[in-house]
Amino acid sequence: MEQFAGKFKSAELADSFRKTFTECQSRMAQVDFSQSDRITELSKPGNPLVFFTVAADGEVIGKITMELFRHVVPKTVENFRALCTGEKGFGYRNSVFHKIIPDLMCQGGDITNQDGTGGKSIYGDNFADENFEVKHTGEGILSMVSCGRDTYNSQFLITMKKSEHLDFKHVVFGFVKNGMDVVRQMGELGSKSGRPSKMITVIDYCARTVLKPLAIFKQQ
C-alpha cells in the first residue's frame, strides 16, 4: 500500500488513500468472516453425511466425511447423496479424482469416462444450476463442477483454499466435516497441470442420515 500512497502529490491525498484502502480491507475481512461463519451455521444435525474411502494406486489413504446442505440446494444434494449410495444402479465407487492441483482443489466424479469429459446425474445427463448462495470461502468446500450454465452431472470438486474465482459459477452443496488431512495428502499427489502422480480412486462410499428423496426430484 505504501508504494502506491507515495505516488500522490499531497500528504492529504495519500492519507485519504490509506484510509480508503484500510476500510476496504476491513469490509472484505468482515465478508470473509460472515461467509465462513455461515458454513458453520449451515451445519445441522439432520443434514445427510456421506463418506469416501480413498486409495492411491490401490493403497488406502483414508476416509473423507462430508456434510451436505440439503436445506440450501436439495436437488444438488440428492444427486450427490444417491451417487454415494449407488441406489440408482450407478455411483462413485471405483471412480477417480482425475484432476488434482496442489493447494487448490481435487476434482473427481466423472463416472462415465474417468477423465473429466463425462459424467451422469440421477436426473439424466445434466441438470440445472440451483443457486449460488454459499461461497468458496476456504478449504474443504464441496462444489459441483460446471462446464457452463445448467451442465451439472456427477462431477464435483473439493477446495484446498479460498477460491473466489469459483463463486457464481459452481454450486456449493457441502463441506468436508472430517478427513481434510486425507484431502491434503491427495493434493500432494497432484501437479500444476492437474494430472495426479498416482491413480486416486474412491474404493468405498456410503451415506448416513439417508432421507427420503423429494417427489419433485423425479426425472421427467
Image (cartoon, grey):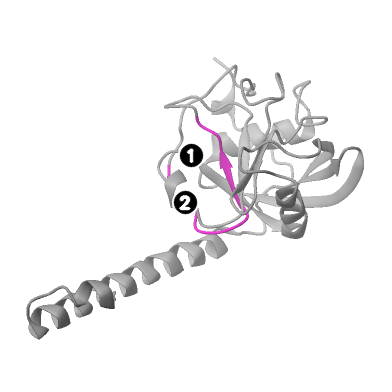
Viewer-proximal residue, 196 or 49?
196
Viewer-proximal residue, 168 or 133?
168
- The residue located at (56%, 43%) in the rendering is 143
Decide: marks 1, 2 in contact (CB < 8 A)?
A: no
* Quadrant hosting residue 25: bottom left
User: Would residue 58 be visible to someone looking at this image?
Assistant: yes
- The residue located at (49%, 52%) in the rendering is 163
Residue furthest to the top in view is: 220
Residue behind mark 1: 170
- Which comes sooner in the sequence, label 1 or label 2? 2
Residue behind mark 2: 134
Q: Position of residue 44 (x, y in %)?
A: 62, 59
Query: Which mark, residue 102?
Result: none
> Left or right: where does residue 108 sit relative to residue 55?
left
* Quadrant hosting residue 34: bottom left
Q: Is residue 200 a member of the stretch shown in magenta?
A: no
Q: Position of residue 154 (x, y in %)?
A: 64, 29
Q: Amino acid at mark 2?
A: Val
Residue 53 to residue 17: above or below? above
> Left or right: where does residue 170 sit relative to residue 178?
left
- The residue located at (75%, 59%) in the rendering is 181
Element type where label 1 sits in the image: loop
Q: Amino acid at mark 1?
A: His
Q: Is residue 133 a member of the stretch shown in magenta?
A: yes
Dot 1 crowding, Cα within 10 Å, few <14, some 14–19, many 20+: many
Circle 1 or circle 2, nearest the eye: 1
| Quadrant location of the C terminus in the rendered image | top right
Question: What range of the chain is rendered magenta?
Answer: 132-146
Dot 2 crowding, Cα within 10 Å, few <14, some 14–19, many 20+: many
